[in-house]
Image (cartoon, coloured by chain):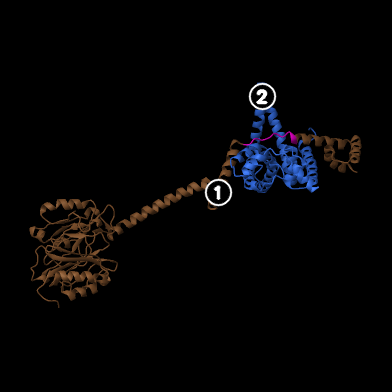
Chain colours: A blue, B brown
Amino acid sequence: MFQRGVEIKETIEDEDREIVTRCQKGDVEAFSILVERHQKKMLNVAYRMTGDYEEACDCVQEAFLAAYRGIEKFRREARFATWLYGIVVNRTRNRLRQIKSRRAHEGTVTEYRLCEQTFRNDYEKMNTTESTAESVADCWERKELEEKVQDCIGGLDEDFREVLVLKDIQDLSYEEIRDALHIPAGTVKSRLFRARLALKDCLVRVLGDAR
Amino acid sequence: MSCEDREKQLPAYLEGDLSSMEMEELRDHLASCENCRKALEDLKKTNRLVRDLAEVSPPPWLKSQIMARVREEAGEKRGWLRKVFFPLYIKIPVQAFAVVVISVFAFYLYRQDAPQMRMKGIPLPSAPVFETTREPASPPSQGEPQKRSVAPKRTVRSGQEMPEASTGRSDEGASLVSSAPDEKTPERGTIAADEVAVENPPAFPEPVPPAAPQALGGEVKGAFSSPVKQKNGEARPATTFPREKNGVCEPDEDLCRYEANAEDVERSLMKETRMTGAETTLEWILSVQDAAAAVAELEDYGGKVGLRYTEAAVRGGQHVFTAEIRPSYIGVFREKLQSLGQVSADKEPEIAKDIQWVRIQIILVPSARNKP
């Protein structure tokens, strides 16, 4: 069973294979390609785990630096991105233990960025003055909703939160989550289901029946 | 199975992760249970909300900052010390502070040592060392060597003033400082000075007051101090020092001016002064029958008492032997001189403890008498 698993891993297609090889041979600049490709996904994982944009940026920086230091030891048993997810989650978990009390204080900046980003996307889509005014209102409503969802995500146990973010936000497969977090696939599933139920209960509590 | 247990199955039900029997049972339950149906709907909405969360974009500086640190990391493998000063915001202030501290310290050292270097006779690039000596104005007769006294020699170390002295005073007929280097040791940068004998010089108070040099007939500015003491004796080994006030040399006053008549010129000896560490000069007159032989013997004997810069010359028909000697060997050397002839100094001079080398000049004069 394990043998088959290894064989499957070896045949996994990895778009980063060539770049990783260059990095392993000492090409420092090739690493910038990997940063460019993955920084957004990694930032979103860190952000959803911490709920703090600045802290998420720091976590991602640390994670990429750790990845660079350890890239020679990367054996391609999983995709590079999966390996990187594991590092980001690990770094973020460590950071969370240090910043618990600061997250709520710095939330305003993050919310503004989120709203601004959403507003820009909507404006590009609709491109009309009336719609723009409407989408600003929608934006703030959505922002409020997202804030509540984020609060509920932040209220989950760390183990549940990691799995929920990787599966429901980053859309990783169970196998990828298993490889990233080094936990059995069955544990991934059970944590995910419990995380979804807990999140549902939280949102019902926060949003009421109106949703 | 209670509704609570059924609700826990809902996430797996949505994923299709239940057995067919469990799926069938749950489906039947949902058809009949309003609360569980609502829970299922809430769960679906929750999943939608989570999936629809807006993505955040990385800041533009994130990639460049990561790569800057990666490049630093790549270059850092050369040494662990660099890790200590890894961020530039630490490294630059530390380096700037170090430069300032070193500069201030160097300037402080320079200010502290410059006067001492001058006092010790260490040649400074901008301040060449000159020595001028006066001898008695009238020469003693051949038969009266005991009357001959040696005047205190004044050492002047000066920078820009000396050319003025050499040119300004030459028209007065005195044999003064000459800038002509000695042909024997031109590479040592020697500078000629004059030496004038003064007969029956007045007694010196101790320490020598500023007026004393003037009493010798020389016009001297500034104060002198003499670490050499000799209370008795007709010859007065004198000590020359750069003039100083409160321990600091004052180049502006480092010029000794002499007035001498034509006879002095005839008697004066041009003397080369090496740029050495000697701070004190003794002048003795040795009366011997054969001056040349005595000089030769002194040269041979020099090695035994550690003489340096030994030099023998004939000036104005007189043999002059000059050298530098450690103060501790002066007594032995004087005894040697006494074995050769009559020495003007009958007592061993007192030398200040901090003097390392003493310049000694012996003028050999012919004597009708035999050695004692």
| Position of A32 relative to B184 (above/below) | above
Q: Is residue B53 magenta?
A: yes
Residue B246 seen from this side: no
What secondary structure is marked by label 1? helix
**Residue lying farthest bottom?**
B372
Q: Which residue in the protein does label 2 denote?
A: A132
- Is residue B159 at all visible to an observer of this figure? yes
The reply to whether the C-beta atoms of the residues labelled 2 and 1 are less than 8 Å apart is: no
Residue at (61, 36) in percent of width and height = B59
Residue A123: x %, y % from top left = 66, 25
Q: What is the chain letter for disc 1?
A: B
Horizontal side, residue A189 vs residue B71: left or right: right
**Three-letter amino acid code at the position of disc 1:** Glu
**Disc 1 target residue:** B76
Dominant SS in magenta: loop
Q: As rendered, which of B350 and B185 lies closer to the eye?
A: B185
Left or right of B95, for residue B9? right
* Residue at 60% from the left image edge and 38% from the top image edge: B63
**Which of the 4 image quadrants contains residue A83?**
top right
Q: Quadrant of residue A156?
A: top right
| Residue type pointed to by label 2 | Thr
In this rendering, the answer to whether B214 lies above or below A172 is below
In the shown orientation, is residue B63 left or right of residue B175? right
Return the x and y of residue A201 as percentages of the image width and height: 79, 40
Q: What span is colored magenta in the figure?
A: B50-58
Q: Which of labels 2 and 1 is toward the front?
A: 1
Question: Is residue B301 one of those drawn in magenta?
Answer: no
